[in-house]
């Protein structure tokens, strides 16, 4: 697909949340996006992931990032890539042996995009928490005030109402 990012190669270390969406947007604008997935996850949407809208316009490879051979393959890809995007918790990329120091030694021009589910990396107050953690998600909803006044089905109290006091009178 031709676009303004024609000729740009991006490695996306698959995750959830902003990473896949960012990869999709880059691919939509013409970048060659290589999505690196864990083995066995690309077919979870039925037909090889083709039904998942976030998978469009990109190449996919399956690598176990805990395997040294897979890490070597990522480093080989990084030699010719223009960017790498990832959405892991702070420190995960370094533990895998793919920290910025290592990748920039291989390709000094490589742009590394790091995203978390909880704000600025690495200094955000909740940056260490996984973005998909249910306990933290409940806390996040509570912080936003979205579920104030909503009761569980086990303890119904009148009708449930949203936290913003939306009523007629």
Image (cartoon, rainbow, N blue to C red):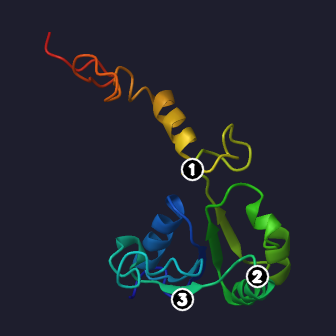
Which image quarter: residue 152? top left
- Count of numbered labels shown in the rendering: 3
Is residue 124 rendered to the left or right of residue 27?
right
Is residue 130 rendered to the left or right of residue 162?
right
Is residue 27 rendered to the left or right of residue 125?
left
Residue 67 — which label?
2
| Mark sitting earlier along the chain (1/3) | 3
Q: Compared with residue 104, is residue 137 higher up or lower down, i.e. above or below?
A: above
Q: Label 1 neighbourhood size at 10 Å, few (<14), some (14-19), many (20+)?
A: many
Query: Is the residue under label 3 in contact with that under label 1 (CB below 8 Å)?
Result: no
| Mark sitting earlier along the chain (1/2) | 2
Q: At numbered mark 3, what does the secondary structure look like: helix, strand or loop?
A: loop
Residue 131 — which label?
1
Q: Compared with residue 113, is residue 161 higher up or lower down, i.e. above or below?
A: above
Quadrant location of the C terminus in the rendered image = top left
Q: Position of residue 96 (x, y in %)?
A: 79, 71
Query: Label 3: which residue?
Result: 7
Q: Label 3 neighbourhood size at 10 Å, few (<14), some (14-19), many (20+)?
A: few
Q: Position of residue 91 (x, y in %)?
A: 78, 58
């Amino acid at each position: 697909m031709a676009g303004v990012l024609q000729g740009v190669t991006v490695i996306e270390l698959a995750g959830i949340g902003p990473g896949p969406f960012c990869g999709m947007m880059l691919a939509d604008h013409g970048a060659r996006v290589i999505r690196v997935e864990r083995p066995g996850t690309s077919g979870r949407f039925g037909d090889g992931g083709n039904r998942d809208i976030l998978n469009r316009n990109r190449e996919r490879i399956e690598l176990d990032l805990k395997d040294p051979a897979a890490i070597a393959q990522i480093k080989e890809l990084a030699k010719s890539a223009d960017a790498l995007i990832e959405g892991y918790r702070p420190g995960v990329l370094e533990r895998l042996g793919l920290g910025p120091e290592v990748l920039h030694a291989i390709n000094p021009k490589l742009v590394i995009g790091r995203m978390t589910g909880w704000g600025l990396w690495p200094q955000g107050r909740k940056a260490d928490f996984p973005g998909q953690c249910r306990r933290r998600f409940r806390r996040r909803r509570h912080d936003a005030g979205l579920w104030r006044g909503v009761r569980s089905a086990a303890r119904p109290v009148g009708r449930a109402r949203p936290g913003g006091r939306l009523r007629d009178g």
